[in-house]
Image (cartoon, rainbow, N blue to C red):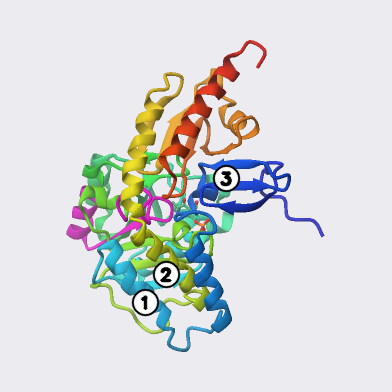
Amino acid sequence: MKLFDVYPLNNITIEKALGSTVWDNNGTKYLDMYGGHAVISIGHTHPHWVKRIEEQLHKIAFYSNSVIIPLQQQLADKLATLSGKENYQLFLCNSGAEANENALKLASFHTGRKKIVAFKKSFHGRTSLAVAATDNPSIVAPVNETDNIIFLPFNDVNALHQCFVEEGANIAAVITEGIQGVGGINVASPLFLQTIRSLCDQYDALFIADSVQCGYGRTGKFFAHDHAGVNADIYSMAKGMGNGFPIGGILIAPHIQPKHGMLGTTFGGNHLACAAALAVLEVMEDEALVQAAAENGTYLMEQLKTIPEIENVRGLGFMIGFDVPENIKDLKKVLLQEYKIFTGEAKPNVIRLLPSLALTKAQIDECIASIKQAIIFLNKPSA
Ligand SMILES: Cc1ncc(COP(=O)(O)O)c(C=O)c1O
């Protein structure tokens, strides 16, 4: 049987990983500045994470949500402490798209309304409503098309005001990333997020903070939206939450009431996933990784800004992007092939850096030296 060929692949087989280092099947070592797509939060195969999962595996891996699973409450308590969203409620699922799907559905249940405001260059996942709220027609199937999504320009406060004046009574939710990831590392301005908050309050709509990529400490605060000093009504989470173990969830503000049967999933919140997610939060706390991401992310960004050939270095913490001009357009490829560094990208010309929050200063220096070397390599007449 063939694999369904939907992923453009690098011809590399990764066999082993530790921290921010991965090795291929030939023993070649790579620096992971991509965090396996912003998923690796505490570092690959962190010993505490491995131990927690292993120990749980010997007890029980799964039972359905028809019984009490104390690990879920432990995870909720730990999340409350680390995120500071003390009175919020937790619903667990399995992926980022599922988290957003549930967030949007919940907003519609709660308000009884149908319209969703989303933004240009947004990415919220590939399931029906999440993909409809994603600004990429090429991944929206005809069956996903709906008139219920209103797309507005990102960071445009006037467009938001205008939209609420016209449609306010029909709007269930506004959904936005704190920093757009797939869209190319576009940071939401504090004024933009504050305006969403005040308009949602004024019109009884819900503010959904898609924190799947920008959340979980990556930007130097637990949620990227925290930089604006506002609380959302729902935070969606996934990627960094399990450090590679599939788990997602939504944090739900106390004023939103649950009802039996309103949301549900077979696998969400299973014992093994909760053990993995608890291990992540324990390591984040023990190793002060949110603070580390803030400090070392700033250092990485400062270093990138000293490289004249790259443009528009931007981001927060370890969610960083920069533009690659035409004359060095193969930078990403050369970094991987010649300098053994994984990076991310956003079309057409952005390199995204999304490393583990535990990336060290020495690894940052190594990355910067390699970028400089790669640019020299690309500028050689023969390259
Ligand atoms: C901001 C954002 N939301 C949602 C998703 C979807 O997450 P998943 O691939 O786990 O469904 C992604 C994935 O890249 C994302 O970046």
Left or right placement of residue 128 versus residue 23 in this view: left
Query: For the residues marked 1 and 3, what is the alpha-carbon distance in whole angstroms?
Result: 41 Å
Labelled disc at residue 366: none
How many dots with numbers?
Answer: 3
Can you identify the residue that label 2 sits on? 278
- Image x and y of residue 102, in percent: 43, 67
Question: Which sits in the foreground, 110 or 246?
Answer: 246
- Badge 2 vs badge 3, beta-carbon distance below 8 Å: no
Question: Which sits in the foreground, 42 or 36?
Answer: 42
Picture quarter with the N terminus? bottom right
Query: For the residues marked 2 and 1, what is the alpha-carbon distance in whole angstroms?
Result: 8 Å
Front: mark 1 or 3 = 1
| Residue 195 covered by magenta stretch | yes
Circle 3: is it few (<14), some (14-19), or many (20+) Cα within 10 Å? few
Circle 1: is it few (<14), some (14-19), or many (20+) Cα within 10 Å? some
Give SS at disc 3.
helix
The amino acid sitting under disc 1 is: Gln
- Badge 2 vs badge 1, beta-carbon distance below 8 Å: yes
Give SS at disc 1.
helix
- Image x and y of residue 23, in percent: 64, 47
Span colored in magenta:
194-222
The amino acid sitting under disc 2 is: Leu
User: Which residue is drawn at the image coordinates 40% and 83% (left, top)?
Assistant: 70
Can you identify the residue that label 1 sits on? 74
| Residue 209 covered by magenta stretch | yes
Can you identify the residue that label 3 sits on? 138
**Residue 363 vertical position relative to residue 73 in the rendered view, above or below:** above
Residue that protrudes farthest toward the right in the picture: 1
Name the N-terminal-most of marks 1 and 3: 1
Give SS at disc 2.
helix
**Residue 27 vertical position relative to residue 375 in the rendered view, above or below:** below
